[in-house]
Image (cartoon, grey):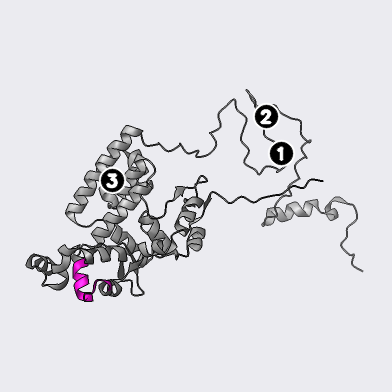
């Protein structure tokens, strides 16, 4: 007697939450690794977001320690300690744009906490060209910029995040939406005069990184950091969006929305009349007819119920009722006789 052995095959891909657990990463660390291109993802065939191939997880498990070190992010204090400089000097480097944040999160006071990639900080420290910045006096031209209130942390993060969105974009119209994600909606309306293209690009705009419920102060903060605010950056993004839309038009026009059905067609003579009452659940579809609907015999209508005359007031009505009473129509009177 031969038996049947059932083997359970592993899925070819898995959800990001499961991939993070198998790799021993927190979700924030996993998302950062995806943004940096350290973890390869593929679109979900069912349209449910992106998934991680099983082969990618097996590849990363073979070098777990080095992989985790490559995606480690640090705050200001830890970053300054890694570089061996005071925290105030490190903050000046970040405001000047010498070091680019890799991600951010809001603290309990809704203040932005920037995080930096530890691997990049080590490279910056090891570069001999930066030795003067780390140990000597800050050059005068950089100190002048600091006096003007320069802060390039948000702008540099936007540039890094735009690169991630462009890598994840699937198609030329999606690339246009990725560029439009960093522009104010009014700028998009000004550039795209075609209503279908404008609506389609705005639909494809990726949302800011999820921080808080939609409409919350934290979500508004994320939207503010996502939107370009410097004139030269806005001009550059407008030019890039124009080129991206031109490339998308060359690949194919923006899809037009399907016309909506606003209800049944109005009744016209020669068609079956519409019924306004509820229909039975067991009734089938009405037959198709080319002319007026035939009349079907129904139950014989009942005669109308007699309506009693309404009693009114006045002498005339009193006489009418008196004439109709039995005492006026019979020979004997019901009135008692006198003795």
Please tell me whether mark 1 sits on a helix, a strand or a loop.
loop
Tell me where the magenta segment starts and ends, as one range.
82-94
Q: Is the stretch drawn in magenta largely helix, strand or loop?
A: helix
Point out the residue furthest to the left here. 140
- SS at mark 3 in the image: helix
Among the two numbered marks 3 and 2 on one chain, the one whose residue lies closer to the N terminus: 3
Report which residue position mark 3 lands on.
189
The crowd level at tag 1 (other Cα within 10 Å; few <14, some 14-19, many 20+) is few
Mark earlier in primary sequence (1, 3): 3
Rendered location of residue 75, percent (x, y): 31, 71
Query: Front-most of 48 and 87?
Result: 87
Instruction: Name which residue lies at 15% across and 63% down.
Output: 129
Q: Is 72 placed above or below 326 here?
A: below
Q: Is residue 332 visible?
A: yes
C-alpha span from label 3 to label 2: 49 Å
Element type where label 2 sits in the image? loop
Image location of residue 247, percent across then percent down: 29, 36
> In which quadrant will I find the C terminus?
bottom right
Which residue is under mark 2? 287
Residue 283's disc number: 1
Distance from disc 1 to disc 3, alpha carbons, whole Å, reads 50 Å
Q: In the visual, does 334 lie left or right of 109?
A: right
């Amino acid at each position: 007697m031969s038996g049947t052995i059932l083997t359970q095959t592993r899925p070819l891909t898995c959800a990001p939450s499961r991939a993070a657990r198998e790799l021993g990463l927190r979700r924030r660390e996993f998302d950062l690794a995806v943004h940096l291109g350290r973890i390869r993802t593929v679109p979900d065939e069912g349209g449910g977001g992106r998934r991680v191939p099983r082969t990618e997880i097996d590849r990363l498990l073979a070098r777990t320690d080095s992989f985790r070190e490559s995606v480690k992010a640090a705050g200001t204090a830890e970053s300054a300690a890694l570089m061996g400089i005071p925290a105030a000097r490190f903050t000046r480097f970040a405001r000047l744009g010498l070091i680019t944040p890799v991600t951010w999160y809001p603290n309990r006071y809704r203040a932005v906490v920037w995080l930096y990639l530890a691997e990049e900080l080590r490279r910056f420290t090891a570069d001999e060209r930066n030795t003067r910045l780390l140990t000597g006096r800050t050059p005068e031209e950089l100190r002048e910029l600091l006096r003007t209130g320069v802060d390039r942390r948000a702008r540099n993060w936007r540039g890094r995040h735009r690169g991630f969105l462009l890598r994840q974009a699937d198609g030329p119209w999606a690339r246009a939406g990725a560029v439009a994600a960093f522009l104010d909606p009014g700028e998009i309306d000004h550039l795209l005069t075609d209503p279908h293209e404008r609506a389609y690009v705005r639909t494809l705009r990726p949302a800011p990184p999820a921080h808080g419920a939609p409409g919350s102060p934290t979500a508004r903060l994320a939207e503010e950091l996502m939107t370009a605010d410097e004139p030269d950056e806005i001009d550059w993004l407008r030019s890039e969006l124009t080129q991206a839309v031109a490339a998308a038009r060359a690949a194919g026009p923006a899809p037009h929305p399907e016309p909506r059905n606003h209800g049944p067609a109005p009744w016209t003579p020669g068609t079956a009349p519409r019924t306004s009452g509820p229909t039975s659940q067991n009734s089938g579809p009405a037959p198709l007819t080319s002319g007026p609907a035939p009349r079907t015999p129904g139950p014989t209508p009942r005669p109308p119920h007699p309506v009693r005359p309404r009693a009114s007031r006045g002498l005339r009505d009193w006489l009418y009722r008196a004439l109709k009473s039995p005492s006026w129509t019979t020979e004997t009177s019901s009135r008692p006789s006198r003795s």
